[in-house]
Amino acid sequence: MTLQELVERERRGVSRQLLVSVAGFVGATALILLLIAVIALGDGRWLALPRLVPFIAWAMVAAVGYFVWQRLRGRAESTSATPALAKVVEQERKLRAGSLRGILEVADSGVLGQLAASKLADTLATGGPALAPALRKRVARRAGIGLGAAALGLLGVTTAAVAAPDGLQAVLHPVKAWNGTLIGAVAIEGAPRHAIRGERITMRVLAPGRSTITVGERVTGSSWRTREVPVVDGAATIAVGPLDADVSVYATDGRSSSDTSTVQVAETPFVGDVTLTATFPGYLGRAPETLQLGGLLRVPRGTVLGVTGSSSAELASVSLEREGAEVPFAISGRSFTGQLVATASGRYEWKAQGVQGPILDRPAALELDVLPDSAPIVEIISPSRDSSVAATDSVRVSVLATDDHGLAGVVLRIATTNARGEVRSSTTRPLSGSGVEQYAGVAIIPIRGLTPGDAMRITAIATDGSPWRQVGQSKELVLRLPSASDQREIARAAADSTLNKALAAANAQKQLNQRTQDAARAQEREKKNGDSTLTFEAAEQAKKFAKEQRDLADRMQQVQDAAKNLEQQLKQAGALDTALQNRLREAQQLMRDALTPELAEKLRNLEQASQNMAPDQARAALQDLAEQQKKLREMLDKSVEMLKRAALEGAMETLKDEAQELAQKQRDLVDSLRKADEAEERSAAEQMAKDLAEKAKDL
């Protein structure tokens, strides 16, 4: 290593140590100044001092710190300069004065200078890594003193922050200290809105972090007056009065102020400023509303009315009364709060008691109209009426249920009863879950477990989503599995109905055939008399005949269907033998054969001729239709005779079975009368005897 490198290394080491010492002393100076500022501004003194004090403290810290930095940095630079360092090295290494400095100057000037520098470098290198160890120790000691001073300053600031936290905050946040937002705002608490004339009132002023506050008062008609009030534990209590006029009060710490509170003076105590907030039941999904007191208030059942208000005097109690029931409210000085649950309509009167006696000036009575939640509406859409079913049927039950706010569920209640109306079993079948306002669905109900004479009674029941779980139910639907006696009665009724339909169709066909023949003969006479035209009235009459014949064809189809139903009913009643079945089917076949394609062709020809106003074609078509109607009438008459005989045979067969069953029941009744011991059993048997006597009479 060359001589210059050795000296430069030493210079850099000394310079670093000097820089650390300078920084330590500057930091210590700044922290000491901040410590002084924190202590000076603590305990709320920053509020009493001018607002510029925190900024002045920071300015002083900056100015003094800059001054110390400049002075110490200058001394450090002079100490670490190469000539000064070389002189110290000469002294510590006991070199001839000026020898190191001289060689450094000529080290690069020639061979001799380089040789001298090399020899001196070798000499200095043998003395250890530090060229000036004593200087190094002094500089290191100075750096340690500076850092220690800085640490003590930091410790002092930390201690002061605990002892005077507001002072530290004022120093760290000078802008907030300037505008007064450094600590909690000044606020007046418990100021009444009304007071009685001559009353003395007290207020509480919240002023955290202050030692004193200034309170300003102004009575209406006069100027503001201020006074200093001490603050204890962040709050001050002030007394105002006796009052003879409205008074306004505010509090300030000199930098921030509270809102101005105004107390109005009244001659007599009163209750006012009542606010009603309606919180509706959750299932309505309705946001809370503020209601106006006065007039009739209509609210849904279960609404919670939040009541708040105040009085001009100290309160002892406030309540609402209705028909002897009382709803008390919580009292806090001159204000009150509470809740009223809307469960019943009525007039709620106010009752108020002050500390000094009853308060007679009260708000208007609360007129409440509670609207109950409507029950669900549910009905069975189909089947629309009671009906008879077969043991192998499955019934589609369509249900519609609605509610104004929502359904909690819809079920079918299915009860099975015997012929005497006694319930054999009862079950429920759920149809829908909760959360819907309308339900429309279909349930397939199999007819199982019924014996002849039993009935299945179905009721749809809907429950709403309100807290009261209101229920609505449909009209009961009765699906009855007819008994043997009922089946026989149904078969006889079907026979009568089928025969009546057939007779009516035959009579109508006979009359239509007669009118058609008369019209055909009339047109033939007109042709012989030389009138070969087709009048409009004749054409319309022909169209009418065609339409009536088509209607009669539909009626005949209905008779066929009725005959088929009669066959089914007789079979279910056990009164259908092979001969009777063949007779019914032959009657149906006759009616099917009567409605031939030729008849339809004749009707189309007649309508076409009437439409074209062709007289010859119309006369021919009318005559053909008359001939076809005659054949149809003859076949229909045969069918009617066969149906009449079949109906009579079926009725007689059912009556025979009815008589046999009735005789068996009478024999069973005689046996039960012989065995009846209890009076109740004998009474039931006697009633059954009367019923059987009535049935025998009917038979």
Image: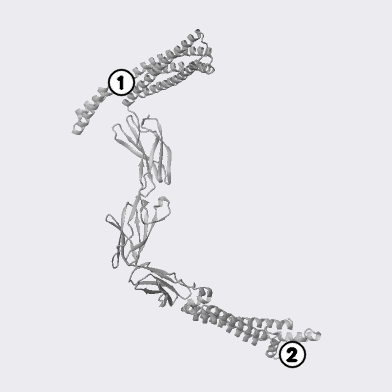
- In the rendered view, tell whether residue 174 sits above or below residue 654: below
Q: Residue furthest top?
A: 528
Q: Residue under label 1, please give it.
A: 655
Side of 17 where 537 appears, left or right: left
| Res. 394 image quadrant | top left
Determine the secondary structure under disc 2.
Answer: helix
- In the rendered view, tell whether residue 207 sits above or below residue 686: below
Q: How is the image coloured?
A: one colour
Q: Residue under label 2, please give it.
A: 99
Quadrant assignment for the N terminus:
bottom right
Side of 310 where 131 appears, left or right: right
Determine the secondary structure under disc 1.
Answer: helix
- In the rendered view, tell whether residue 357 sits above or below residue 523: below
Q: Amino acid at mark 1?
A: Leu
- Residue 214 seen from this side: yes
Judged by depth in the image, the label closer to the viewer, 1 or 2, is 1
User: Nearest the camera: 672 or 238?
Assistant: 238
